[in-house]
Amino acid sequence: MLKHYLKLLVSAAAILIAASATAQEPLKIGMVLEMSGAFADFGMQMMNGARAYMKVHGDMVAGRKVELIVRDTTGVPDVAKRVAQELVTNDKVDFLAGFGLTPSALSVAQLATEAKKPMIVMNAAASVITTRSPYIARVSMTLAQVTAPVATWAIKNGITKVYTLVADYGPGIDAETQFKKTFTAAGGQIVGDVRTPMRNPEFAPFLQRIKDARPQAVFVFLPAGEQVVAFMKGFAERELDKAGIKLIGAGDITEDGVIEAMGDAPLGVVTTHQYSVAHDSAENRAFLKAYAEVAGTKQRANFMAVGAWDGMAAMYEVARRLNGKIDGDKAMDILKGLKIDSPRGPLEIDPVTRDPVETIYVRRVERLKDGKLYNVEFDKFPNFKDPSK
Ligand code: PHB
């Protein structure tokens, strides 16, 4: 008899627990992404990275069903601000996340502060971003962080005269500033610099100017995607390589997602960055498998997809530790110092700057046995922080 009552009691409790779980509101993640326009690749990579994470880790965390609500910024900062406001006010999201472009992240910073919404930056990489709101945590990189190592590598490898070319906006200026600082401090000389427009840049005249200046190498940062493909083709067409000018850069210029569209031009190019598809680890293999399942095998993942995957890992962990009740201040306390086993290697969110601390790899573009181009890692700077902060 007693046994029977106990059984009833247990199943009643189980029903109650199940009911309270299903009665919980979904955990809403507002994704502010470039889904159309010249930077639509960014949104596609981040969406697929986030979906790949959910494919492996499920769509339930701390009793709440995870819902991604995607809004298109079209690459315009004012649109990013408006859609973020709608996500907070109308959709009542628990987190803001995404942000491919620096200007979009900057335009949403104040809203994150006012609404006390944790804002997870999955790519945007100007150093200043995390200083604009205490509710921002970044899981990607900063340009200063991925640039300093290639300046060090260049000097160590006998390159002393460099021309710099960067996109004329926050991350580009950070890259230029950091490259010059690290390179000249180690005895290098900058023989010229140029900043190219963010919209529809025409690289031919700049490439000619660089060729005429005869540097040993040109250091380049351009936003990943279409621009780097156009630049790489121009570099080969103008025969800068044949004139003995080496190309070095932040890894954005040989990013995995578009590298196959560059022909042979990037072969031998050395860059420094936090992620390569060729990174050899169990975490990376699991990531790439899941990515192929959601995105198909034609589209290769890149560092932005990894940023989204890791951003999801961070939000899942916050949800777990807060038992599903997301409070902005408590979430930020958890994010500060959070460690993640990323497909790129170990990743930590610096408790002071809320920026990533991670390994920056030195890589060379090679054609591997499968006939495809890869950034092959051959040296590294472990636990590397943004040196400008
Ligand atoms: C940025 O706008 O912060 C940004 C965009 C593309 C990159 C890196 C940084 O490849």
Image: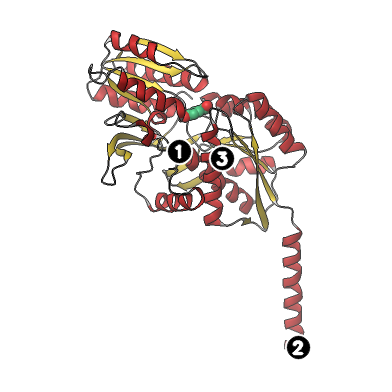
Q: Quadrant of residue 110?
A: top right
Return the x and y of residue 164 as percentages of the image width and height: 37, 16
Return the x and y of residue 1 as percentages of the image width and height: 76, 91
Q: What whole-number distance in Å separates the C-alpha atoms at marks 1 and 2?
A: 59 Å
Label 1: state its secondary structure.
helix
Q: Say which amino acid is labelled 3.
A: Lys
Q: What whole-number distance in Å separates the C-alpha atoms at marks 2 and 3?
A: 50 Å
Q: Quadrant of residue 275?
A: top left
Residue 2 higher or lower than 218, as above or below:
below
Disc 1 residue: CB within 8 Å of ligand 1: yes
Q: Marks 1 and 3: CB-CB under 8 Å?
A: no
Label 3: state its secondary structure.
loop
Q: Residues within 10 Å of mark 3 (few under 14, many from 20)?
A: some
Label 2: state its secondary structure.
helix
Q: Is residue 53 shown to the viewer in this render?
A: yes
- Write down the residue under mark 1: 303
